Amino acid sequence: MNKLTIFLFAFLIVSCNNFKKKDTIENPKPDIVETPVLNLKQANHLAQLPLHCIDTEYPNRLGQTLGSDYDLKSPKTLHPAFYGCFDWHSSVHGHWSLVRLLKMFPELDNSESIKKRLLKSISKENIETEVAFFDGEHNKSFERTYGWAWLLKLAEELHTWDSSVARELEGNLQPLTDLISDKYIEFLPKLNYPLRVGTHPNTAFGLSFAYDYAESVHNDSLKLAIKERANYFFLNDTDCPMSWEPSGSDFLSPCLEEAALMKRLLPKDKFKIWLDAFLPQLKNPNYKLDVGLVSDRTDGQLVHLDGVNFSRAWCLNKIAEGLPEYKHLKNIANQHINYSLRSIVGDSYEGGHWLGSFAIYALSSVANLST
């Protein structure tokens, strides 16, 4: 082999190595992060959050409209079922958390005691008082639609739990469940524009949970109302501005909540076409989405960003479900859960009164659950 041949051969090796290095830099593979699991140990850990707050009456944000001095009553008087956890919706999904954990882990610590607490809260008499509040002249739109959505999620969880306790709780809750379902059916045709926000009134979030309930109990009227309005609002949407998210106190992702809703409603092939137009970047296997950074967990608004991490995760897992070309989104979901999960138990009440539910729902969305 002459010197020229040796030189050319060496040049080719160096060039190939440089090309490979350049390709690696320009197309970095996302780091594979640990998959979080909801096992019995984690369940007992997370159960402490709702157990701590469902009977904690104060501090409390009532959110009611006063018609007279007569309406100035204590939270427990106004809402004997759902007075704890700072506000009504957080109390509702605190109860959902306990039902969910008991359903998944019958051997949960103090399970019999927890069941008794649930039966005490969600009694027939207490739910009658809750219904009367919604029927009042000034609070017919109370908790629309965020609290409505969580109430139906609680009803769904009870309906799908094979337990004599669940049957009693479901029966007690039924008058309020029916009322909220009817409220959705009445309200949706009146809503001319969706609320595309990252907080409580987000329309897509409210419709997703309501649809899950309607599916579980075969409520065709509610399903139809949701499908008609969701298609009217969202079917022609394109290029959702993910780069604008999150806002400073978001706990929901407007773009991802909408995508997760449409995943529920559209056939798979139509959904993939819709998603390509709505969030085309999600299909890139190297897509990255930074977690929402929380600077102060004692601030009730700033800690919302732990919530956005959990809700993003459940949306990303819903989007990727059954779609191999989007499986890389699960890694992003895991990253978001892991960032916030380590901080929510033992932290301040500002986040502790509600974040447990978000963590449990996000962990439940992870395909690889460990029991």
Image (cartoon, helix red, strand yellow):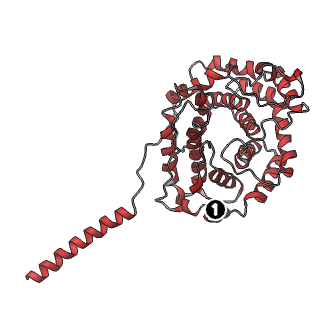
- Residue found farthest to the left: 2
Tell me where residue 364 sits by quadrant.
Answer: top right
Residue drawn at point x = 72 percent, y = 34 percent: 154
**In the image, residue 286 lies at what x, y percent?**
46, 59
Q: 10 Å neighbourhood of mark 1: few (<14), some, or many (≥20)?
A: many
Circle 1: residue type: Phe
Q: Could one spot residue 104 in this view of the protein?
A: no
Tell me where residue 149 sits by quadrant.
Answer: top right
- Residue found farthest to the right: 137
* Viewer-closest of 298 and 110: 298
**In the image, residue 27 lies at what x, y percent?**
40, 63
Compared across the picture, whether 107 is left or right of 167 comes to left
Question: Total marks drawn?
Answer: 1
SS category of the residue bearing label 1 = helix
**In the image, residue 146 lies at what x, y percent?**
73, 40
Residue drawn at point x = 72 percent, y = 64 percent: 236
The N terminus lies in quadrant: bottom left
Tell me where residue 3 sits by quadrant.
Answer: bottom left
Residue drawn at point x = 82 percent, y = 52 percent: 224
Residue drawn at point x = 78 percent, y = 19 percent: 74
Question: What residue does disc 1 label?
Answer: 278
Compared across the picture, whether 138 is left or right of 9 comes to right
**In the image, residue 46 lies at what x, y percent?**
56, 28
Q: Could one spot residue 56 in this view of the protein?
A: yes
